[in-house]
Image (spheres, coloured by chain):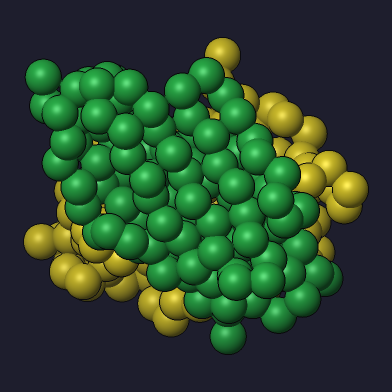
Amino acid sequence: DADVTQTPRNRITKTGKRIMLECSQTKGHDRMYWYRQDPGLGLRLIYYSFDVKDINKGEISDGYSVSRQAQAKFSLSLESAIPNQTALYFCATRGTSGSGDEQFFGPGTRLTVL
Amino acid sequence: EDKVVQSPLSLVVHEGDTVTLNCSYEVTNFRSLLWYKQEKKAPTFLFMLTSSGIEKKSGRLSSILDKKELFSILNITATQTGDSAIYLCAVAGAGSYQLTFGKGTKLSVIP
């Protein structure tokens, strides 16, 4: 079984709709991240969380919100989707301090906003 | 602001060729540099480098870091079609639990 899972894997929605992307992990990691990837732009950080009470904005948080429901679950919401939020979204996890900087990625959610 | 620049942005080679991918960086209080391979979806971890001049190697892939000149290279020898992917470079600064990614190098290996 995958250590980091994302649902849905693909989603098509319309402008103005609210949408939630979910991430779950079984790695026992406390740090979780949401990225978006656009062609030619690499991975850009949206939000990250160190535990259920610690949420931080990343480079491109406008238009997004997150919820850390439990150590293993981190959700990303688009309150009112717009076409330029069409992208590939990744959730990632990282272990505690001292475990190295490696982040482990989920399979991604391809979101299309019409 | 941390910055990572990868070059070239794309590269097409024939099977059996050797390729070198470049990554230069600017980061406050450098801690580590990481390389990832992204084939279809999720990036998968290749190497993490923290010390200058020490080569990390895994099969036909190897990487080395130059902390003085602020760059790293990823070498792939005897390329195969399965090496076709986007290769991502990322850096972490001391006291940060974030990674800053470059835009990636898209490698295409043709038979």
Q: Looking at the image, which residue sits at the far right?
A: A98
Q: To which quarter of the image does residue B76 belong?
A: top left
In the image, taking residue B72 as reference, residue A50 lies left or right, namely: right
* Residue for point 65% across, 40% down: B55
Find chain A in the image and tell me its colour: yellow
Side of B25 relative to B6 (left or right): right
Instruction: Left or right? Give the position of A54 relative to A25.
Output: right
Q: Position of residue B16 (x, y in %)?
A: 24, 21
Q: Quadrant of the N terminus of chain A?
A: top right
Q: Colour of chain B?
A: green
Q: Position of residue B84 (x, y in %)?
A: 26, 31
Q: Is residue B53 above or below residue B83?
A: below
Residue drawn at x 89%, y 48% is A98
Q: In front here: B102 or B67?
A: B67
The answer to whether residue B19 is above or below residue A13 is: above
What residue sits 47% from the left and 44% below the top?
A: B74
Measured as percent of width and height from the top left, residue A6 is found at 46, 37
